[in-house]
Image (tube, coloured by chain):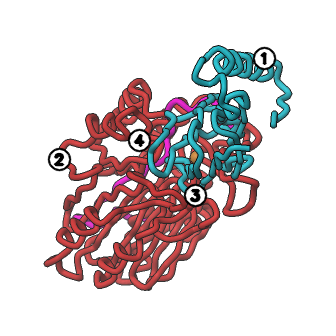
């Protein structure tokens, strides 16, 4: 589930994100009985060489996906249906979005629209 | 007293620009076929007969992809190289009538980037006509900052046309509302406008079209083309001389299709790899001493009645 990242700041950030989402899942009364809620998790996608890596990711509802641009060129993350949209991400900039509902979420880079990806959200 | 061969007249026009041109390649259009020779070879061939260009001719500059704000290893100071480009333009023996900037003025659409680009380019002391690149559409409003600064007297996302000494110039925007999985995009509204803009113009009117992304498919895998360019080109085919200038790919690539010639320009900021020559089209890192040879500006010389337009690409170093 976790992509390994070499930079300590990434690791620390991920740990924090995980802890926060876990805390939210545990503390929120509405989530207490929902099996999906305790799967609160994170997923990373790299934007590298003008591509989303991995391009297709399957996650459980409640997962926060974080995109990090490691290219020297700016990119963006924009849902085809405009349901989510980052600003332009310069080198090392990140964007996160939490997917709560099951479904297929196709997205692209609005600067380089040949760059496409998909998040598939489905219960485990 | 006039020399009658178009070859010599074209060269004469181009000689206006050769005093400052360094080691760039020179592009000549003759009979619809593009050919290139090095500037040194051209100078050697024509120096003895060099004369002034005929009255009524004019020249203009193309500057592209200045990416003001870019500070990555491929070029830590894109402002400095833009300054060098403008300094080079100021050394031209004949002052160009205006500049066409074919987009990616800024790197991240920040106000300070646009303002600095304008301040540097204004040093040339001639009017500037703009089209946006995708890097100029990155403000919250998705291009509102660009339009606020450059969009006066333009339509839609910033398209327009104007005439200069018998030549019709058309500025097209192919970086707005880009579609998932696609490339550059003009859109129906702009195509409808273009049809109206060209309707009724004589087929003998020389046309110059400028846009950011190439209007022919240079390399689809990298999105180097415009989805609906075929529709625009079909409107242009009846004209006897159509010159299409673009940026975006930070290198000189050209193609001729009947009376239409396509020319992509160098950037003033950083080079990009040849199509498919790298893992991605991202900034190409080259040795510091090689960088200036891969950046540059373009001069176009128009001689009335002598088509096509002669282009000279000159590197910064
Ligand atoms: Cu991109």
The answer to whether residue B88 of the structure is visible from this angle is: no
Q: Would you name the residue on which mark 4 appears?
A: B137
What chain does mark 2 sit on?
B
Residue appearing at x 46%, y 60% in the figure: B184
Q: Position of residue B191 (x, y in %)?
A: 28, 68
**Closer-to-camera residue (B49/B9):** B9
**Mark 4 on the same chain as mark 3:** no
Residue appearing at x 17%, y 76% in the figure: B199
Q: Would you name the residue on which mark 1 appears?
A: A12
What chain does mark 4 sit on?
B
> SS of the residue at dot 1?
helix
Which mark's residue is nearer the viewer, 2 or 1? 1
Which comes before the other along the chain, label 4 or label 2? 4
Q: Position of residue B52 (x, y in %)?
A: 34, 62
Relative to A35, A8 lies left or right = right
Q: Is mark 1 within 8 Å of ligand 1?
A: no
Check residue A114 in the rendering and tell me which mark sits there, or answer none: 3
């Amino acid at each position: 589930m976790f992509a390994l990242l070499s930079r300590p700041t990434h690791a620390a950030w991920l740990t924090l994100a995980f802890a926060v989402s876990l805390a939210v899942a545990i503390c929120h009364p509405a989530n207490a009985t929902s099996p999906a809620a305790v799967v609160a998790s994170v997923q990373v996608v790299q934007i590298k060489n003008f591509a989303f890596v991995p391009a297709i990711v399957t996650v459980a509802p409640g997962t926060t996906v974080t995109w990090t641009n490691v290219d020297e060129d700016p990119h963006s993350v924009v849902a085809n249906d405009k349901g989510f949209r980052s600003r332009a991400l310069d080198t090392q900039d990140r964007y996160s979005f939490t997917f709560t509902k099951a479904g297929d979420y196709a997205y692209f880079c609005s600067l380089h629209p040949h760059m496409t990806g998909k998040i598939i959200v489905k219960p485990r | 007293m006039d020399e009658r061969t178009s070859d010599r007249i074209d060269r004469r026009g181009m000689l206006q620009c050769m005093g400052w041109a360094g080691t760039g390649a020179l592009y000549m259009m003759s009979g619809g076929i593009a050919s290139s020779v090095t500037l040194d070879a051209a100078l050697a061939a024509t120096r003895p007969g060099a004369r002034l260009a005929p009255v009524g001719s004019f020249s203009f500059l193309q500057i592209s992809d200045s990416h003001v704000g870019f500070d990555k290893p491929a070029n830590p100071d894109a402002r400095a190289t833009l300054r060098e480009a403008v300094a080079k333009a100021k050394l031209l023996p004949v002052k160009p009538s205006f500049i066409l900037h074919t987009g990616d003025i800024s790197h991240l659409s920040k106000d300070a980037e646009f303002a600095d680009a304008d301040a540097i380019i204004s040093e040339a002391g001639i009017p500037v006509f703009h089209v946006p690149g995708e890097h100029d559409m990155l403000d919250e409003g998705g291009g509102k900052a660009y339009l606020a600064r450059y969009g006066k007297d333009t339509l839609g996302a910033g398209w327009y046309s104007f005439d200069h000494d018998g030549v019709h110039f058309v500025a097209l925007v192919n970086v707005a509302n880009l579609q998932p999985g696609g490339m550059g995009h003009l859109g129906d509204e702009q195509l409808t406008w273009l049809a109206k803009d060209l309707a009724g113009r004589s087929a003998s009117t020389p046309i110059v079209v400028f846009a950011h992304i190439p209007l022919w498919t240079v390399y689809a895998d990298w999105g180097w083309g415009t989805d609906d360019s075929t529709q625009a080109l079909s409107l242009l085919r009846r004209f006897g001389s159509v010159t299409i200038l673009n940026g975006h790919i930070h290198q000189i690539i050209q193609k001729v299709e009947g009376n239409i010639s396509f020319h992509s320009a160098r950037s003033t900021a950083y080079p990009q790899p040849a199509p498919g020559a790298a893992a991605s089209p991202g900034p190409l890192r080259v040795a510091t001493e090689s960088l200036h040879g891969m950046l540059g500006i373009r001069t176009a010389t128009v001689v009335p009645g002598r088509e096509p337009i002669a282009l000279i690409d000159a590197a910064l170093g």
